[in-house]
Amino acid sequence: MERREQLYEGKSKIIYSTDDPDLVIQYFKDDASAFNGVKKGTIVDKGGINNAVSSKMFQYLESLGAKTHFVRQLNDREMLVKRLDIIPVEVVVRNVAAGSICKRLGLEEGLSLPKPILEFFYKNDPLGDPMINECHIDVFNWATADEVVQLKERGLKINQLLFDFYKKRNIRLIDFKLEFGRHKGEVLLGDEISPDGCRLWNWDTNEKMDKDRFRFNLGSVEEKYQEVYHLVCKE
Ligand code: TMP
C-alpha cells in the first residue's frame, strides 16, 4: 500500500491518501490536546498505543458484527482504513457520570447511571463541539433520519460490547465518543477507540487510566496508557 499526499492533519492524527481511492492511512501522533486545543502537550508513545488499542478494538467489534472502517494495522503508527464521508456528529455514550455531563447537570463524578445515556455533539472545533439534538441534525442535514437511528442503535450496541470487553480486563468503561461516516452507501464506525476518547477507570479503585490524567495533570499519564495497552493488546 503506497502512502501518498497528506489530506488532513488533526490534533492527534494525520490522514494520507493511498494508491487506492477507497482507502486512506491514519497516522497516530504523540501530540495530546485537551479543552478544545487550549492545553497542548505530548504523551510519549501515545500514537503507537492508540494505534494498537484502536486496531484491537476495531477487530473485536468487527468480529461481533459491528461494521467499522478498519482494514488492517500497517505498522506501529499507521492504520489502513476505508475512506469515509464523515458525519459531523459525535456520538457520546455514558455509563457513569463524568466530564461535561457533571458540569451541565450538577452531577457528582462517579454517579452510576441506571441506563446508558447517549448524547450528540456537533463536530466543529472552532465552536468547541457544542451539544446538539436530533432536530439540529435534521434541520441542518448533518445526517438522514435513518442514519440517526443507526447512530443511536449502534452507539448503544458498541457500548455493550466495549463495556464487556473492558470489564474482563478489570476496567470500567465510564464513557466514550464515537464518529461514523459513509462508505459506498454504508454507515461505518470511524476514527479511533483509544484512551484519548474513552474514560476508563480501574474497576476496583476507580483510578483513572485515560486522557483525564493529561487534562487534569494527574501524573503517570504514560504509565496508565501503557497499562491499558498491555491489558487490551497483550492479554
Ligand atoms: P465529555 O464528558 O467531555 O463530554 O466527554 C465524554 C467522552 O467523550 C469522554 O470520554 C471524552 C470523549 N470526547 C472526545 O474524545 N472528544 C470530544 O470532542 C468529545 C465531545 C468527547
Image (cartoon, grey):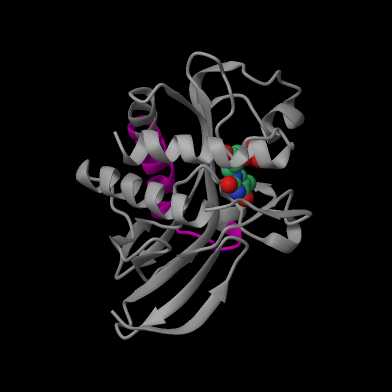
Q: Is residue 197 above or below residue 191?
A: above
Is 142 situated left or right of 1 in this image?
A: right
Q: Nearer the viewer, residue 54 or 143?
A: 54
Q: Residue at x 55, y 51 (%)?
A: 90
Tell me where residue 162 sits by quadrant: top left
Q: Magenta stretch containing residue 6, yes or no?
A: no
Quadrant field for ligand 1: top right
Rendering coords of residue 195 (x, y %): 51, 42
Identified at 51% across, 80% down, the residue is: 7
Tell me the residue at 65%/36% (across/down). Answer: 213
Specify the quadrant that holds the N terminus: bottom left
Q: Quadrant of residue 125?
A: bottom right
Magenta part, dominant SS: helix
* Segment colored magenta: 139-161
> Which residue sits at x=29%, y=71%?
184
Left-right relation of 208 to 19: right
